[in-house]
Image: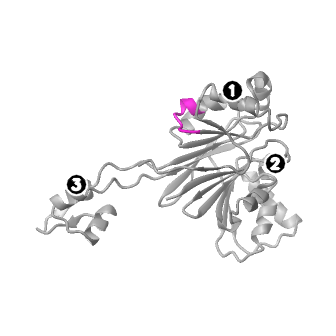
Amino acid sequence: MNFEVFSLGTSGMMPLPGRFLTSVLLRREGEMYLFDCGEGTQISLKKLNLSWKKISRIFISHMHADHVTGLPGLLMLSSQVDRTEPLHIYGPQRLGEYIEASRRILDMYINYEIIFTPVSEGLVFESDELTVNAFTLDHTKLCYGYSVVEKSRAGEFSVEKALAHKVERGPLWAALQRGETVLNQDGEPVSPDMILGPRRAGRKFTYITDTAYFPQLADFAHHSDILFCEAMFDSSLAADAAEKKHMTAAQAASVALDSESAMLCLQHYSPRYSDKQLKILETEAKSVFENTVLTRDRMCFDIPLKD
């Protein structure tokens, strides 16, 4: 069961050659969720051969231009093919106004349903297999981070226990794995907890952008398998970061460390850093949290099942 994260754009404030504005895509079992949609998102999707038609949900953090300027083009692009499924978009209340104004002023032809849902802190979306939760960040305007958490899976099936409890091979084994109680060869009930091991935890992806550091960020990101976190500045510019309500690379690493995350992917870099100078951010973060990746545009990260 695949769980892949693609970095589509890593720049903050303005796009640079080879460094588009902030956007991250999560692909799980063919379904795709997009987090922010900065300028250049379409290009990265095309270069990675990712079908934007399969994007079912878009989650926007806040209404600063470097996080939403790619959205009108993506909406128009989606109208160029037959699409029967609705597109769900989540974000601050004003995002709905932005979508409607763009459609009206640009006279967009949209041949599918757009469903906008304003976000508040807490559960944003839930399916049979996962949840998406939002949490409020500390930025110059209302801004949200997001966590995607797979629901726990059934425990490992024990063939030895099934045979010991006289449960025949075949459909009854599948029923036990679905959580159903079955009758064995003697007509006695056998429940899943008698055959299956402990439930297995799902995977977690957390997306944090545009925020001043505060300790509770670690609570939101707790036990993330992969944490995408902004690293706008290095520590020599900590005063600028605080004033503009952004984080340094060291602060992003502190969030990863305190949250006991497995991997940190830095993103949303200030355009003041050239591609070579970005190593400053990587070195700083790694001094706090070793398993840090200096994320570049169009990198892909696979999150395997835990067991």
Q: Which residue is mark 2?
A: 18
Q: What is the C-alpha distance between the residues marked 1 and 3?
A: 50 Å
Asked whether residue 249 is drawn in magenta, I would say: no
Residue type indicated by callout 3: Met
Disc 3 residue crowd, few under 14, some 14–19, many 20+, Cα 10 Å: some
SS at badge 3: helix
SS at badge 1: helix
Disc 2 residue crowd, few under 14, some 14–19, many 20+, Cα 10 Å: some
Residue type indicated by callout 2: Gly
User: Could you say which quadrant of the image residue 293 lies in?
Assistant: top right
Q: What is the C-alpha distance between the residues marked 2 and 1?
A: 23 Å
Q: Which residue is mark 3?
A: 194
In the image, what residue occupies the spot 72% across and 31% down? Answer: 281
**Tag 2 near tag 1, CB within 8 Å:** no
Residue at the extreme front: 276
Residue 284 — which label? 1
Which is more toward the observer, 97 or 236? 236
Q: Which residues are magenta?
A: 256-263
Q: What is the C-alpha distance between the residues marked 2 and 3?
A: 55 Å
Residue type indicated by callout 1: Glu
